[in-house]
Amino acid sequence: MQTITKQDYIYKTEPFDHQRKIFLESRDKLAFGYLAEQGTGKTKMSIDNAAWLFAKGEINTLIIIAPNGVHRNWIDDEIPDHLPDWVDRRTLFWEGGKAGSKKYQKEIEKLFDKGDFLRIIAFNIESFNTVKVKKLLSRLALLECMCVVDESTRIKTPGAKRTRAIVTYSKKMKYKRICNGTPITQSPLDLYSQFRFLNPRIIGAVSFLSFKHEYATWEKKLNRKTKREYEELVEFKNLDKLKAKIAPYCVRVRKSECLDLPEKIYKRYYVEIDKEQRRIYNDMLANSVAELRTRETPQFESPEKELEFFLQDTDKIRAKNAMVKLLRLQQILSGWHYASEEDKTVVPIVDKNTRLAAFMELISDIEGKVIIFSRFVPDIEMIIESLSEEYGTDSVVAYYGAVEDDDRFIAKRSFQDLNSPVRFFVANPQSAGVGLTLHAAQSVIYYSNSFSLYDRLQSEDRAHRIGQRNNVTYYDLEVAGTIDRYIIESLRAKKDIANEITGDTESWL
């Protein structure tokens, strides 16, 4: 291990100016948030911070909590790339399927050997509902730890079991960091659990209830069906106060301010659907709104906006029904639907899939490697099949729920390899939207979007990050006058609210 002073920390990879400045600002703080846009190197900053604290004798253990798949990237890619060679280390990423094997247990026990080395273990956030992880965390928390929560909006829900578990076990850990380029994806209330993890004193609120009333105005309503009162959000307030509270404990990094990256270019690619498909869509939309509407439902400028309103309903059954109907509308625009809620057989509703045909026309006009995102598995499978038929099976890789972890790793590596025949990376934003570097692509196509601002912003920056030398063009497939357009407008509105806290001003979409 290197013996260091405050002047002679030796980096493995030379930092950009903003990374060096933030390292000096944050390295000795007990709690800090790297609210850095995707691609600005927040992972490197966290790793350098851990190496610094290890060299000073402040920590001997680095615990990383990240989304599934991303936790493996820390161990396989980021640690080897950025942790200085003078730091002796033992690394492990959590594999739930192997946790019961004797061989894996021996690997875990090696972390608890005595010695002057940095113990590094990466967990996937989803594993925090398991007893084995909780027991292991209880042991690790007794060591001198730095804990990093990557993509920290995954712990934004105060009542979620994994959020409570992570906050509970982290109380014994001396140094804590959060990493997120999009810390606000729904509302400013997203910040509560993230900063409570760092230190409850930062926010100051004794509970989420007091926090939400300090920073938002609510109106009491009566649910006529259940006869219960509920609170409906009226507006947010005191956002300057909230911004001032968190400011000493975090830094906001925007790519436009610190990196000489090429531009993002946004384009719409309009899809024409036939009269029958349009009729089915319009009928479904009208029936959905009529079914959910009550006498208390306010007036909206469009039925799509009214449907989204029902997603926020305190009546969970009605909110769930609204989501189902929104999904069905999108599926209709993709030219298919499921046989029923129970039977997931895909049933075409038109002879020719106009969305898929438009997509293939768009692909024929694009050169180079392309990332394709879609929220529905049937669409992903149809896209893969069409691209394979047109360009060959070796031109396509997939990255979504049905793909095993090892195959995902191979898919990422082969797509990034400029000498590989792989040209198309077809994925679900929830699976491939975080933790991946895919700057081999110059084009990204959104076959379909969701209402998740987090998924959209994260997935965009798989290609637009350090190492990208070309402008990145983003294409959104859209059937004019439908839910396609309204989803984009909804994402913009959420981004505008988030900008009030983060101070972002760049135009988007």
Image (tube, rainbow, N blue to C red):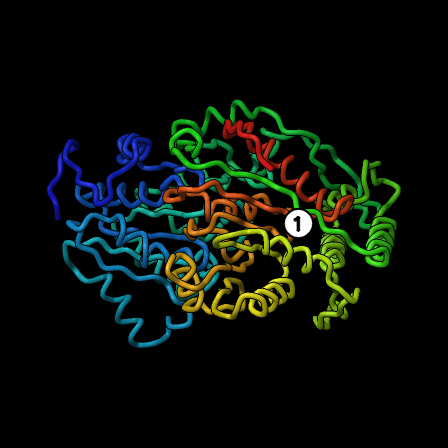
Give the SS element for disc 1: strand
> Residue 210 in the image: x percent, y percent?
57, 34
Q: Residue at x 74, y 48 (%)?
A: 479
Q: Amino acid at mark 1?
A: Leu
Residue at 37 percent of width and 74 percent of height: 100
**At which x and y percent is residue 342?**
73, 71
Compared to residue 155, the image places residue 14 above or below, namely above
Residue 73 placed where, x, y %? 37, 56
> Can you say which quadrant of the picture contains the C terminus?
top right
| Residue toward you, 496 or 361 | 361
Q: Residue at x 66, y 42 (%)?
A: 488
Binning the other alpha carbons within 10 Å of mark 1 as few (below 14), some (14 to 19) or many (20 upward) gives many
* Residue 189 seen in this snapshot: yes
Q: Residue furthest left?
A: 3
Q: Is residue 238 above or below residue 81?
A: above
Left or right: residue 388 compared with residue 123: right
Q: Is residue 2 left or right of residue 228?
A: left
Compared with 451, 134 (above or below) is: below
Task: Name the one closer to the observer, 157 or 332.
Answer: 332
Report if residue 179 is visible in the image: no
